[in-house]
Image (tube, helix red, strand yellow):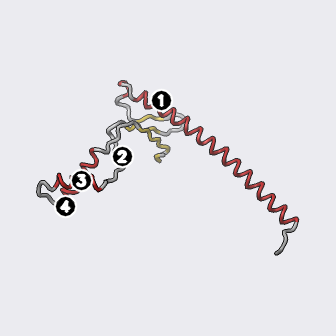
Amino acid sequence: MAQPTPEDIANLRECVRDYAEADNQLRELNSQVYSKRDERSAAEDRIIELMKLPQFASVNELAVSTDGSKIKIERPGTRNVPWSLSQYRLLQLLKTFFANDHTAEACFRHISDGVKQCHKRDTFAIKRTVRGVEE
Protein backbone atom coordinates (compact mmCIF):
# COMPACT_ATOMS: atom_id res chain seq x y z
CA MET A 1 0.00 0.00 0.00
CA ALA A 2 1.36 3.39 -0.99
CA GLN A 3 2.21 5.84 1.76
CA PRO A 4 1.10 9.48 1.49
CA THR A 5 3.87 11.93 0.77
CA PRO A 6 4.44 14.97 2.97
CA GLU A 7 2.91 17.03 0.16
CA ASP A 8 -0.20 14.80 0.15
CA ILE A 9 -0.55 15.21 3.90
CA ALA A 10 -0.11 18.99 3.63
CA ASN A 11 -2.78 19.13 0.90
CA LEU A 12 -5.14 17.03 2.99
CA ARG A 13 -4.60 19.23 6.06
CA GLU A 14 -5.32 22.34 3.99
CA CYS A 15 -8.52 20.79 2.63
CA VAL A 16 -9.62 19.75 6.13
CA ARG A 17 -8.96 23.29 7.43
CA ASP A 18 -10.93 24.76 4.50
CA TYR A 19 -13.77 22.36 5.16
CA ALA A 20 -13.85 23.11 8.90
CA GLU A 21 -13.73 26.87 8.23
CA ALA A 22 -16.59 26.67 5.72
CA ASP A 23 -18.57 24.44 8.09
CA ASN A 24 -18.05 26.88 10.98
CA GLN A 25 -19.18 29.77 8.78
CA LEU A 26 -22.29 27.84 7.73
CA ARG A 27 -23.11 27.07 11.37
CA GLU A 28 -22.80 30.76 12.23
CA LEU A 29 -24.94 31.80 9.25
CA ASN A 30 -27.59 29.20 10.16
CA SER A 31 -27.63 30.58 13.69
CA GLN A 32 -28.17 34.08 12.28
CA VAL A 33 -30.93 32.78 9.98
CA TYR A 34 -32.78 31.19 12.91
CA SER A 35 -32.43 34.41 14.88
CA LYS A 36 -33.78 36.49 11.97
CA ARG A 37 -36.68 34.08 11.52
CA ASP A 38 -37.55 34.53 15.19
CA GLU A 39 -37.42 38.32 14.73
CA ARG A 40 -39.64 38.10 11.66
CA SER A 41 -42.10 35.84 13.47
CA ALA A 42 -42.32 38.27 16.41
CA ALA A 43 -42.93 41.18 14.00
CA GLU A 44 -45.58 39.10 12.20
CA ASP A 45 -47.32 38.42 15.52
CA ARG A 46 -47.35 42.15 16.31
CA ILE A 47 -48.76 42.97 12.84
CA ILE A 48 -51.49 40.35 13.29
CA GLU A 49 -52.45 41.75 16.69
CA LEU A 50 -52.79 45.21 15.15
CA MET A 51 -54.76 43.86 12.17
CA LYS A 52 -57.30 42.40 14.62
CA LEU A 53 -58.22 45.92 15.74
CA PRO A 54 -61.51 47.25 14.30
CA GLN A 55 -59.81 50.28 12.77
CA PHE A 56 -57.79 47.97 10.51
CA ALA A 57 -60.69 45.66 9.54
CA SER A 58 -60.71 46.87 5.93
CA VAL A 59 -56.93 46.75 5.42
CA ASN A 60 -55.87 43.73 3.34
CA GLU A 61 -52.52 44.89 1.98
CA LEU A 62 -49.65 46.95 3.34
CA ALA A 63 -47.00 48.68 1.23
CA VAL A 64 -43.41 48.66 2.47
CA SER A 65 -42.08 52.10 1.55
CA THR A 66 -38.41 51.19 2.04
CA ASP A 67 -38.25 48.58 -0.73
CA GLY A 68 -41.53 48.71 -2.63
CA SER A 69 -42.68 45.29 -1.47
CA LYS A 70 -46.20 44.54 -0.26
CA ILE A 71 -47.56 42.52 2.62
CA LYS A 72 -50.87 40.76 1.99
CA ILE A 73 -53.04 40.20 5.04
CA GLU A 74 -55.04 36.97 4.89
CA ARG A 75 -57.83 37.09 7.43
CA PRO A 76 -59.46 34.10 9.14
CA GLY A 77 -62.03 32.35 6.97
CA THR A 78 -60.73 33.88 3.73
CA ARG A 79 -58.39 31.09 2.67
CA ASN A 80 -58.37 27.32 2.65
CA VAL A 81 -55.80 24.97 4.06
CA PRO A 82 -54.49 22.30 1.71
CA TRP A 83 -56.71 19.31 2.17
CA SER A 84 -56.51 15.59 2.12
CA LEU A 85 -59.41 13.22 2.42
CA SER A 86 -59.41 10.22 4.72
CA GLN A 87 -61.25 7.09 3.70
CA TYR A 88 -63.59 7.55 6.65
CA ARG A 89 -64.48 11.12 5.65
CA LEU A 90 -64.91 10.07 2.00
CA LEU A 91 -67.31 7.32 3.06
CA GLN A 92 -69.32 9.80 5.16
CA LEU A 93 -69.61 12.20 2.23
CA LEU A 94 -70.55 9.44 -0.20
CA LYS A 95 -73.26 8.14 2.12
CA THR A 96 -74.86 11.57 2.40
CA PHE A 97 -74.54 12.07 -1.34
CA PHE A 98 -76.00 8.73 -2.40
CA ALA A 99 -79.04 9.28 -0.22
CA ASN A 100 -80.23 10.95 -3.46
CA ASP A 101 -79.68 10.18 -7.17
CA HIS A 102 -76.93 12.37 -8.71
CA THR A 103 -74.28 12.51 -11.46
CA ALA A 104 -70.52 12.05 -11.09
CA GLU A 105 -70.00 15.83 -11.41
CA ALA A 106 -72.51 16.45 -8.65
CA CYS A 107 -70.77 13.81 -6.53
CA PHE A 108 -67.44 15.57 -7.05
CA ARG A 109 -68.92 18.95 -6.09
CA HIS A 110 -70.58 17.43 -3.02
CA ILE A 111 -67.32 15.92 -1.77
CA SER A 112 -65.24 18.97 -2.64
CA ASP A 113 -67.69 21.34 -0.92
CA GLY A 114 -67.88 19.07 2.12
CA VAL A 115 -64.12 19.02 2.50
CA LYS A 116 -63.74 22.76 1.93
CA GLN A 117 -66.22 23.50 4.72
CA CYS A 118 -63.93 22.03 7.35
CA HIS A 119 -60.69 23.35 5.84
CA LYS A 120 -61.12 27.10 6.20
CA ARG A 121 -58.19 28.68 8.00
CA ASP A 122 -59.20 30.33 11.24
CA THR A 123 -55.98 32.26 11.71
CA PHE A 124 -54.33 35.28 10.19
CA ALA A 125 -51.43 34.89 7.76
CA ILE A 126 -49.02 37.32 6.17
CA LYS A 127 -47.53 36.96 2.68
CA ARG A 128 -44.88 39.39 1.45
CA THR A 129 -44.54 40.16 -2.25
CA VAL A 130 -41.31 41.63 -3.60
CA ARG A 131 -41.50 42.83 -7.21
CA GLY A 132 -44.52 40.65 -7.89
CA VAL A 133 -43.03 37.45 -6.43
CA GLU A 134 -44.64 36.02 -3.32
CA GLU A 135 -42.22 34.79 -0.66
In the image: residue 8, left or right of residue 21: right
User: Tag 2: residue type?
Assistant: Val
User: Tag 1: residue type?
Assistant: Arg
Depth check, front residue: 127 or 111: 111
Q: CA distance from mark 1 to mark 2?
A: 23 Å
* Mark 2 surroundings: few (<14), some (14-19) or many (≥20) residues within 10 A: few
Residue at the outermost left position:
101
Which mark, by number, is residue 33?
Answer: none
Q: Residue 9 location, x and y as percent?
A: 84, 63
Q: Earlier in the sequence, mark 2 or mark 3?
A: 2
Q: Which residue is mark 4?
A: 104
Q: Residue at x 46, y 31 (%)?
A: 47
Q: Earlier in the sequence, mark 1 or mark 3?
A: 1
Q: Residue 30 location, x and y as percent?
A: 62, 45
Q: Which residue is mark 3?
A: 111
User: Tag 3: residue type?
Assistant: Ile
Q: Earlier in the sequence, mark 4 or mark 3?
A: 4
- Residue 88's image quarter? bottom left
Which mark, by number, is residue 46?
Answer: 1
Tell me the mark number nearer the camera, choosing from 1 and 3: 3
Q: Residue at x 46, y 39 (%)?
A: 70
Q: Residue 78 location, x and y as percent?
A: 33, 40
Q: Which residue is mark 2?
A: 81
- Residue 127's image quarter? top left
User: Tag 4: residue type?
Assistant: Ala
Q: CA distance from mark 2 to mark 3?
A: 16 Å
Q: CA distance from mark 4 to mark 1?
A: 47 Å
Q: Secondary structure at mark 2?
A: loop
Q: Secondary structure at mark 1?
A: helix
